[in-house]
């Protein structure tokens, strides 16, 4: 067991993958000599050389396009988009080529590559540095979308993403980069398997990435008020673990879904629909969503209001009123 930050765990995953598989290459803006803006690639160029970890021009579309060619040639590229919104120029490459290569070639070619994207807010970043862009990627068939929320999962999921035969968008929560935990670096649950981060009996709170800690904070406060919240950490959005989420909701009978991104047409809406379709007869109340507002990301002084922290999650839980007259079931509040 070692105390590591999430950034250090990601660095260890890259270091181990580079050391064990010569087809793995790491590249992007400032990932070489600098070691990345968040130091995730620190020391990799020095250890493995400039042919295995190297800097690229400031051209995200070119970075991803180059990675597609390398993947077709037998390499396993791991590319870094320096910030979430910086990846938008590469989206055409991702949607038109990365995601469709296997289908377009009837399986003759694949794109075993990882696109690492630091995302989400809470760091006091200015515009273009705090977007939650996951909905664009999960709506693109052919991509897997992974969002670790813990230090240990960051290591294991990145190792699995690099080994995956298909492209993975790997979303890294910026404000968790320097969160510390006592961990053993090892493979954990495979991509597509959620975890029960906290057991409970009254309400299921489904979260991923930056929202997991907020959900756990809300569960702690709720426990002091006599309410038991079960928190599900999705780990990956695509593939989605319907079984774990549905089992929890069938147990609790109610569900709140949390996302940091703006609400309209977001991932939380898809999760709410899936829960309603699979658990309709177990639900004692409507599925509620807690999200960012439908606005461009606000200035740093206003982001606390925008983000779905514990108090906003508890507000959603409070919208479900306990009614002793209805066989101790929850009903929708006014």
Image: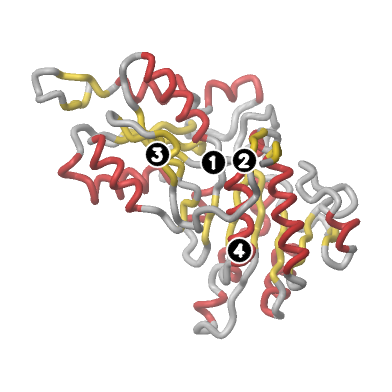
Decide: marks 1, 4 in contact (CB < 8 A)? no
Residue at 80% across, 53% down: 29
Whole-number angstrom distance, CA of label 2 to CA of label 1: 6 Å
Secondary structure category for the residue under label 1: loop
Q: Which residue is mark 3?
A: 206
The reply to whether residue 334 is in sight is: no
Side of 213 relative to 242 (left or right): right
Between disc 3 and disc 2, whose residue precedes? Answer: 2
Q: Which residue is mark 4?
A: 94
Residue at 41% across, 54% down: 240
Mark nearer the viewer, 4 or 2: 2
* Badge 2: residue crowd in 10 Å (few <14, some 14–19, many ≥20): many
Whole-number angstrom distance, CA of label 4 to CA of label 2: 20 Å
Whole-number angstrom distance, CA of label 1 to CA of label 4: 22 Å
Side of 311 relative to 29 (left or right): left
Decide: marks 4, 2 in contact (CB < 8 A)? no
Mark nearer the viewer, 1 or 4: 1
Side of 210 relative to 67 (left or right): left
The relative height of residue 105 versus residue 255 in the rendered view (above or below) is: below
Who is closer to the viewer here, 130 or 76? 76
Between disc 4 and disc 2, whose residue precedes? Answer: 4
Between disc 1 and disc 4, whose residue precedes? Answer: 4
Mark nearer the viewer, 3 or 4: 3
Whole-number angstrom distance, CA of label 3 to CA of label 4: 27 Å
Q: Which residue is mark 2?
A: 173
Q: Position of residue 96 (x, y in %)?
A: 57, 69
Whole-number angstrom distance, CA of label 1 to CA of label 3: 11 Å
Q: Position of residue 184 (x, y in %)?
A: 64, 46
Q: Position of residue 111 (x, y in %)?
A: 61, 72
């Amino acid at each position: 067991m070692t105390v590591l930050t999430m950034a250090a765990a990601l660095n260890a995953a890259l270091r181990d993958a580079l050391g064990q598989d010569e087809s793995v290459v790491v590249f992007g803006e400032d990932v070489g000599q600098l070691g990345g803006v968040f130091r995730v690639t620190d020391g990799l160029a020095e250890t493995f050389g400039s042919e295995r970890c190297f800097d690229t021009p400031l051209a995200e579309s070119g970075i991803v396009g180059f990675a597609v060619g390398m993947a077709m040639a037998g390499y396993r590229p791991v590319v870094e988009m320096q910030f979430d919104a910086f990846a938008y120029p590469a989206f055409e490459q991702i949607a038109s080529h990365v995601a469709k290569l296997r289908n377009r070639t009837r399986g003759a070619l694949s794109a075993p590559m990882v696109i690492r994207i630091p995302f989400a807010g809470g760091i006091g970043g200015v515009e273009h540095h705090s977007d939650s862009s996951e909905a664009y990627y999960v709506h693109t068939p052919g991509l897997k979308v992974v969002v670790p929320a813990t230090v240990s999962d960051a290591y294991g999921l990145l190792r699995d993403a690099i080994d995956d035969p298909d492209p993975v968008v790997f979303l890294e929560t910026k404000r968790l980069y320097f969160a510390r935990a006592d961990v053993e670096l090892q493979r954990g649950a495979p991509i597509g398997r959620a975890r029960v981060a906290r057991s409970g009996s009254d309400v299921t709170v489904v979260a991923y990435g930056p929202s997991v800690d907020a959900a756990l904070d809300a569960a702690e406060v709720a426990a002091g008020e006599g309410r038991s919240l079960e928190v599900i950490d999705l780990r990956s959005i695509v593939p989605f673990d319907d079984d774990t989420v549905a089992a929890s909701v069938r147990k609790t009978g109610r569900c709140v879904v949390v996302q940091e991104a703006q609400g309209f047409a977001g991932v939380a809406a898809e999760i709410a629909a899936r829960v309603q379709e699979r658990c309709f007869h177990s639900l004692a109340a409507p599925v509620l969503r807690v999200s960012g507002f439908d606005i461009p990301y606000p200035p740093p002084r206003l982001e606390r209001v925008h983000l779905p922290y514990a108090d906003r999650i508890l507000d959603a839980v409070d919208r479900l009123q306990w009614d002793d007259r209805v066989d101790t079931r929850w009903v929708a509040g006014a």
